[in-house]
Image (cartoon, rainbow, N blue to C red):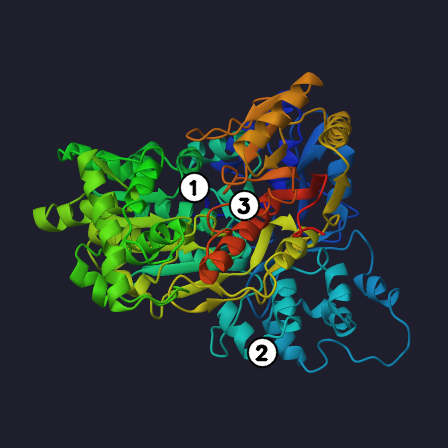
């Protein structure tokens, strides 16, 4: 049958990106030339399709790149779809192709890859079982429902043999990922109805044409594995960028969040590594590309710290055209506020503690006698009651809610306490200073009073758990309420800056528009489990007055369990770290995939100096710059600084008693609520640090180790 060139669809498999990254530079140029020719017309005479005799899939073909290299192409007998699957040296390419089959699932409509290279998957389960009559994990699920979950018909029998999560994990690489994920949710305690709702499967839908590969490529589950190429420049940029597949392939749960017109603000929760920031980045791109693409439209992407903003800007530049990128402004919120206020003639300097700490001491010295309150109480009351509620008078303070404060105050005591706040406020005015939360309030009031129209049609908020009430009240003021106005991602398990917020109290209504990501793509499940154990038994909020949990939170990757090493002294610890780094360098040739994390800057400097003395290259993760992935050396960063980043290996060093948890003001507070919050923040720092690792975590201490790791 002659093919209609105008309808030809060329797709690239995620596996192709993996194989391309391993091809030598000289051959990569030839591969790119071939792809461009292939995309222009897959039926050109120069493209010699050859059948792969031993291939189990009759639609598999090889194509010549040069004398040594071959590409593997899926070329269905009917239709106008061509899929680039793999590229490799001749023999290796054929060997890879022999045991792959590609088929359209008759229930889900997705194009699935079944790899039978490891043999019969039922054998994997059979070898781990004995004839003890134990009930199968999915005995209560009917075949038709397993099919609806994405299980291929030929693998129903092996699924029936699964008795526990260990059996299921052994099948992770041999059954399609969407099927594995759905089965995992059931194994985690979700009802079948809950899982169907999660994957948006319905009983009433159009019959699937198992020969229509074009329609199959549009399926959300297919799109996690295959990308339909529309633009030559976009393709070249993808193939020349580092191998980070999130730039191209989104999980269906992410696609549903990103590529949808919402009726109002959206909140997205999810554990570390579930791709919240990835979804936020793609959301900003999608909004600028499809909804708000007029000349003057702008999308604001804001996050908590400057180095995260720099990293996000760098990542956006790798997936957006210049025209789309021009409509997306990236800024951490503090910097945006400072710039906006300065442009409007703001007469105060915003201080982050360097000067206001001394003013607090002066104000507390003026406290009336007889209150018997610790000095730390006043600042805690200011940050947890006065600032969040924008209290500006004694009368407002008398009526203010103090829910969550562990020390009660009667009316007389409140009046005395307010005198300290009046003194502090006078000192701030006298010195021309404002705290960041007060500056955000001033910016919000300025916007409201001036009735100024900002260019933003939508705002995307990353790391929402570290932003407070004043921040979100300002964000609500910055963009008009309406469809697609706010896209907010966060995880209170990773809150490390003490702020709590109830979005509804900031005028942000997320009712009916709250979603949760559950699959961790970054860390191994062993690292995830260790990190989660640090927060076991703690109550974690959901950013809107409710509680969050990590039910169904799972990593699809497996590796080694985090290693904890405790040494008698600093020298022994550093000797171990140096040996560990040198071993990895011997294996990989580089150190730039490793990060050493410490709780404080002072401690980090000690490790930096000690490693330099041992002739080990180091690279500091800076406050306001994106990490240069190509720069040599082991990365060094504080626990706060590495937030939002990822590395192959993470060394969490100096996890000592008195360092983690740090003996901070919160830990010494007389308020039991503050003490609890302080401990949660310290545990969250350790959780965040561990979940930066993609392959392995090593935790070290010297002297007396932290009680968190004993």
Does the residue at mark 3 contact the one at mark 1 (Cβ under 8 Å)? no
Any part of residue 324 in sight = no
Q: Position of residue 585 (x, y in %)?
A: 73, 26
Label for residue 546? none
* Residue depicted at x 64% and y 74%: 146
Q: Position of residue 512 (x, y in %)?
A: 35, 70
Tell me if 190 is positioned left or right of 335 in this view.
Answer: right
Label for residue 230? 1
**382 is higher (above) or lower (below) than 24:** below
Q: Secondary structure at mark 1?
A: loop
Taking the view exactly as shown, the residue that stands out farthest to the front is 369
Q: Secondary structure at mark 3?
A: loop
Taking the view exactly as shown, the residue that stands out farthest to the left is 450
**583 is higher (above) or lower (below) than 274:** above
| In this view, the mark in front (2 or 3) | 3
* Residue depicted at x 51% and y 69%: 198
Q: Position of residue 11 (x, y in %)?
A: 53, 45
* First of labels 2, 1 by sequence position: 2
Q: Which residue is mark 3?
A: 663
> Callout 2: few (<14), some (14-19), or many (20+) C-alpha neighbours within 10 Å?
few
Label for residue 191? 2
In this figure, what is the number of numbered marks?
3
Taking the view exactly as shown, the residue that stands out farthest to the right is 131
Tell me if 506 is positioned left or right of 153 in this view.
Answer: left
* Residue depicted at x 22% and y 39%: 427
Q: Secondary structure at mark 2?
A: loop
């Amino acid at each position: 049958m002659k093919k209609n060139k105008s309808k030809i669809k060329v797709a690239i498999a995620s596996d192709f990106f993996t194989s391309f990254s391993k091809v030598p530079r000289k051959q990569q140029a030839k591969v790119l030339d071939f792809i461009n020719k292939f995309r222009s017309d897959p039926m050109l005479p120069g493209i010699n399709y050859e059948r792969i005799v031993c291939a189990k899939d009759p639609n598999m073909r090889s194509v010549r790149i040069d004398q040594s290299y071959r590409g593997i192409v899926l070329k269905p007998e009917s239709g106008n779809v061509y899929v680039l699957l793999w590229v490799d040296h001749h023999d290796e390419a054929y060997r890879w192709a022999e045991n792959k089959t590609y088929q359209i699932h008759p229930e889900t409509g997705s194009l699935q890859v079944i790899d039978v290279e490891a043999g019969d998957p039922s054998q994997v389960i059979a070898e781990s079982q004995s004839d003890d009559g134990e009930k199968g994990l999915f005995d209560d699920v009917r075949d038709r429902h397993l099919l609806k979950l994405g299980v291929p018909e030929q693998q129903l029998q092996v699924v029936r043999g699964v008795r526990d999560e260990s059996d299921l994990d052994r099948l992770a690489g041999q059954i399609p990922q969407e099927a594995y994920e759905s089965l995992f949710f059931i194994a985690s305690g979700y009802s079948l109805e809950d899982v169907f709702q999660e994957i948006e499967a319905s009983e009433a839908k159009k019959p699937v044409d198992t020969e229509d590969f074009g329609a199959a490529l549009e399926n959300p589950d297919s799109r996690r594995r295959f990308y339909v190429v529309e633009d030559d420049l976009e393709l070249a940029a993808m193939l020349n960028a580092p191998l980070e597949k999130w730039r191209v392939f989104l999980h269906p749960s992410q696609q549903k969040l990103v590529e949808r017109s919402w009726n109002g603000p959206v909140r997205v929760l999810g554990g570390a590594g579930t791709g919240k920031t990835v979804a936020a980045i793609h959301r900003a791109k999608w909004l600028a590309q499809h909804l708000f693409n007029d000349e003057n439209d702008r999308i604001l992407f804001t996050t908590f710290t400057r180095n995260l903003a720099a990293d996000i800007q760098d990542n956006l530049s790798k997936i957006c055209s210049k025209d789309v990128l021009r409509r997306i402004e990236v800024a951490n919120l503090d910097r945006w506020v400072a710039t906006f206020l300065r442009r409007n003639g703001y007469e105060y300097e915003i201080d982050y503690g360097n000067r206001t700490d001394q003013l607090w001491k002066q104000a507390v010295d003026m406290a009336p006698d007889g209150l018997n309150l610790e000095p730390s109480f006043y600042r805690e009351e200011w940050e947890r009651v006065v600032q969040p509620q924008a209290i500006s008078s004694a009368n407002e303070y008398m009526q203010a809610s103090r829910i969550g404060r562990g020390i009660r105050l009667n009316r007389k005591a409140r009046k005395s306490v307010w005198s300290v706040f009046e003194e502090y406020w006078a000192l701030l005015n006298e010195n021309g200073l404002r705290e960041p939360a007060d500056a955000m309030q001033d910016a919000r009031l300025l916007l409201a009073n001036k009735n100024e129209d900002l260019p933003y049609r939508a705002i995307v908020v990353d790391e929402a758990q570290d932003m407070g009430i004043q921040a979100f009240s300002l964000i609500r003021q910055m963009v008009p309420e309406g469809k697609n106005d706010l896209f907010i991602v966060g995880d209170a398990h990773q809150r490390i800056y003490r702020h709590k917020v109830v979005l509804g109290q900031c005028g942000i209504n997320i009712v009916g528009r709250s979603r949760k990501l559950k699959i961790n793509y970054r860390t191994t499940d062993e690292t995830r489990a260790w990190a989660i154990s640090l927060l076991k038994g703690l109550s974690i909020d959901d950013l809107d007055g409710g509680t969050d949990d990590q039910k169904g939170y799972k990593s699809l990757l497996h590796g080694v369990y985090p290693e904890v090493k405790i040494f008698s002294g600093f020298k022994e610890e550093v000797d171990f770290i140096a040996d560990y780094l040198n071993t990895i360098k011997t294996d990989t040739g580089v150190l730039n995939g490793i990060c050493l994390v410490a709780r404080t800057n002072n401690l980090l400097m000690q490790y930096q100096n000690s490693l330099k003395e041992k002739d080990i290259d180091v690279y500091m993760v800076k406050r306001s710059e994106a990490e240069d992935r190509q720069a040599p050396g082991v990365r060094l960063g504080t626990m706060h600084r590495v937030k939002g980043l990822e590395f192959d290996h993470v060394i969490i060093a100096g996890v000592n008693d008195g360092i983690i948890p740090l003996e901070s003001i919160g830990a010494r507070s007389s308020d039991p609520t503050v003490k609890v919050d302080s401990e949660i923040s310290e545990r969250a720092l350790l959780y965040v640090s561990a979940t930066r690792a993609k392959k392995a975590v090593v935790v070290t201490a010297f002297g007396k180790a932290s009680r968190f790791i004993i």
